Amino acid sequence: MTDATGFAHIPPTTLADVLGRAQVMDIGIRPLWSPTPRVAGPAFTVRCPPGDNLMLHAAIHRAEPGSVVVVESGDVDYALAGGNVCAVAQRRGIAAFVLDGVIRDLGEVREMGFPVFARGVIPIPGAKAAAGPLNVAVRCGGVEVHAGDIVVADEEGVVVTPHARREEVLRAAEAKLAKEAGETLDAWEAAHRARIDKILSDQGFEG
């Protein structure tokens, strides 16, 4: 399993600045309870066809502790998981679910404190009929995710760092945070105004 050490203290906003829009999941993938803690871990990827949740139910017994289970589904008519599935995932050390779909039993999930990022809630469960491979490339929230990619998620959103760029992105994100920590608001304001005024001037704005 890919080591996600170092990413837990990096906000998704910083990673988004480093990686760009293509690695940021769309705004429909949101934490389902609040306040949800930030999670960071390697992706364990799952693909479920609409109306079926078999492979997510299989994944909770196979994903390693610390994994973020990422599911491609795109289905908002049937729940991918409920309270017991989330409880088993939590007990087995899975860090979170990131689902392009919906769950049920939100009250139970909130009470146990298991982080779920998804499109919403519906009370009816999916079927368990469609077997398929695990840890293949999936698309979740508009982002292609491969097994071992680093997923960081909190109330700001979900960002995926490709495994091959892990070290590069972590260094850039840490450098950005260090620079920001050493900058006063006065210095930021002065630099910001100068940059905005230059853009306006270059476009012929007067005022």
Image (tube, helix red, strand yellow):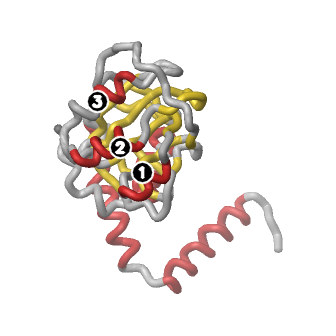
**Dot placed on the residue nearer the N-terminal end, 1 or 2:** 2
Nearest the viewer among 28 and 59 is: 59
**CA distance separating discs 1 and 3:** 18 Å
Residue that label 1 marks: 109
Label 1 vs label 3, nearer the camera? 1
Residue that label 3 marks: 59
Is label 3 in a helix, a strand or a loop? helix
Label 3 vs label 2, nearer the camera? 2
Residue 117 seen from this side = yes
Asked if labels 2 and 1 touch by Cβ distance under 8 angstroms, the answer is: yes
Is label 2 in a helix, a strand or a loop? helix
The image position of residue 193, as x and y in percent, is: 62, 75
Q: Amino acid at mark 3?
A: Ala
Residue 31 seen from this side = no
Q: Which mark is residue 95?
A: none
* Left or right: residue 155 compared with residue 114: right
Q: Which of the image's four quarters has the C terminus? A: bottom right
Residue that label 2 marks: 86
Q: Amino acid at mark 1?
A: Val
Is label 1 in a helix, a strand or a loop? helix
**CA distance separating discs 1 and 2:** 7 Å
